[in-house]
Every structure is written in C-alpha cells, then in structure tokens.
Amino acid sequence: LDRINVAIDGPAGAGKSTVARMVAQKLSYIYVDTGAMYRAVTWYLIRKGIKPEDHDNVLQTVRNMVIELIPGQEVQRVLINGEDATPHIRSLQVSGLVSQYAGIESIRTRLSHLQREMALVKGVVMDGRDIGTTVLPDAEVKIFMTASVEERALRRYKELKDKEQVSLEQLENDIAQRDHLDQNRKISPLRRAEDSILLDTTSMDIAQVVETIVSHCRSYV
Ligand code: C5P
C-alpha cells in the first residue's frame, strides 16, 4: 500500500497529540509533534533570557540552533544544541509563553522547513496548527480537530492536576488566550484548511476519534 501523510490541526487541548500518536501506531507511521518543537525552542530561549520582542537576538540564536527530533512510541524527544528539552516543555511557564515565540517569523520558517523534510518520506502523522494549511498543504488526509474550551480545559486539567498546582479556571483562561493568539497571528494563523475534515470531539472518546481518522486514511489508500 502507498504511504500517505496525515495532517492533524486544531486548537490547544483538543487531544491532537494523544490521537495523532495512536493513529500513527495503528498505521505504523511516524508521529511528529510540531507543538513540541515550538515548545522546545521556547524553553531554550526563555532559559537564555531572550525575550520574544528581541527579534535580532532570537534570529541569531535560532539560526545557529541545532534542533533534533527523536521519534518514539511514547514520547518524541526534542534536543536543542544537544540538550534534551523534553522534560521541560509541558511546564506552565512554557505553555504560557509559547504562542508569543511561535508568532516569530524566523522561528516558524526554521521549524516548518524541518517539518517538511521529515514528511518527505511519507507515512507521517503530523499534528500542529498550520500543518494542513502551510507545512503540508498536499497531505492526503487533513483533519481539523476541535472541542469546546470547557472540554479542552477539563482534559488538560486531568493531565496536569497531579503534577502542577493549577485550577480549571486558570486552564480555561490559558487555553482561551492561546486560541486567541494562535488564530490572530500574522504568519500561519490557526485556521481550518478548506479541504480538511472537521471533527468536533467534545462528546467523543479517544478511541472513537482515532477510529474515525484511521478509517479516513484507509479509505484514501
Ligand atoms: O500543540 P501544542 O499545544 O503543544 O502547541 C503549543 C503551541 O505551539 C501552540 O499554542 C502554538 O502557539 C504553537 N504551535 C504553532 N504551530 C504548530 C504547532 C504549535 O504555532 N504547528
């Protein structure tokens, strides 16, 4: 069978990464979490004390950065200049700032280029915000996954509550703010590709979402 590329986009907390990972597993494809790449770059720049508005410094640092992505069954690791960013990228600090860094052109250009390279081999399930519209406009299957803000905050809350002190209300606010920034930035804003399949997962469980996407993929090939 011919291998295809699958693009999964949608707002924060829609469950894209869990679903994309499982779809990749079922199809024996490679899963690429592009949000983890933006998060890793954000973590690195925060630690270096480089603010998002300091464009020259961001540009210099990003230009010289070695970014490695190591796919895995459970977690995909991201190394920046040889350092493993993976344990740090889900922190509230990174989550709170990532959308600001993700709006910077030099960062987007660099990461989209890497993402396209990874998809050349085909057989990739890639999740993000701009995969179907900008990174892989020719992906054979494009999914746009959504869920209500309340449901997305609840899902994140269940994920985080044992690790960080956080309230549901705070998560709702964070998610709404991230949606706003992601949808309104100038370069590659989050929007649904016209030829994508819209999947509202508010009242679907993970298995149903995975099954729906896999069947779209199977009917394609
Ligand atoms: O998917 P995740 O929530 O981990 O993504 C974190 C942030 O990275 C998003 O809120 C968005 O600002 C940015 N992002 C992006 N383009 C992508 C993937 C993520 O701008 N393709």
Image (cartoon, grey):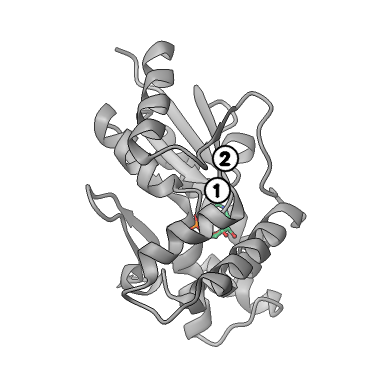
State the image quarter where residue 179 is shown.
Answer: bottom right
Give the x, y percent position of residue 165: 42, 82
Task: Identify residue type, mark 1.
Answer: Ser
Q: Is residue 215 positioned above or below 57 on the image?
A: above
Type of amino acid at the residue the image marks with label 2 = Val
- Within 10 Å of the Cα at label 2, are there few (<14), some (14-19), or many (20+) other Cα atoms? many
Q: Are marks 2 and 1 in contact (CB under 8 Å)?
A: yes
Query: Circle 2 sits on which residue?
Result: 135
In-front residue for pair 119/102: 102
Q: Quadrant of the C terminus?
A: top left
Callout 1: helix, strand or loop?
A: helix
Q: Position of residue 8 (x, y in %)?
A: 50, 38
Q: Depth check: give the residue in front, 163 or 7.
A: 163
Reply above or below: 180 against 161. above
Which residue is rendered at x = 63% and y = 79% of the image?
57
For label 1, the residue is 112
Estimate the spatial distance between the alpha carbons at disc 2 and disc 1, rounded to whole Å. Answer: 6 Å
Neighbor class of circle 1 (other Cα within 10 Å; few <14, some 14-19, many 20+) is some
Q: Is residue 28 visible?
A: no
Confirm if mark 2 falls within 8 A of ligand 1. yes
SS class, disc 2: helix
Between 103 and 158, the one nearer to me in the picture: 158
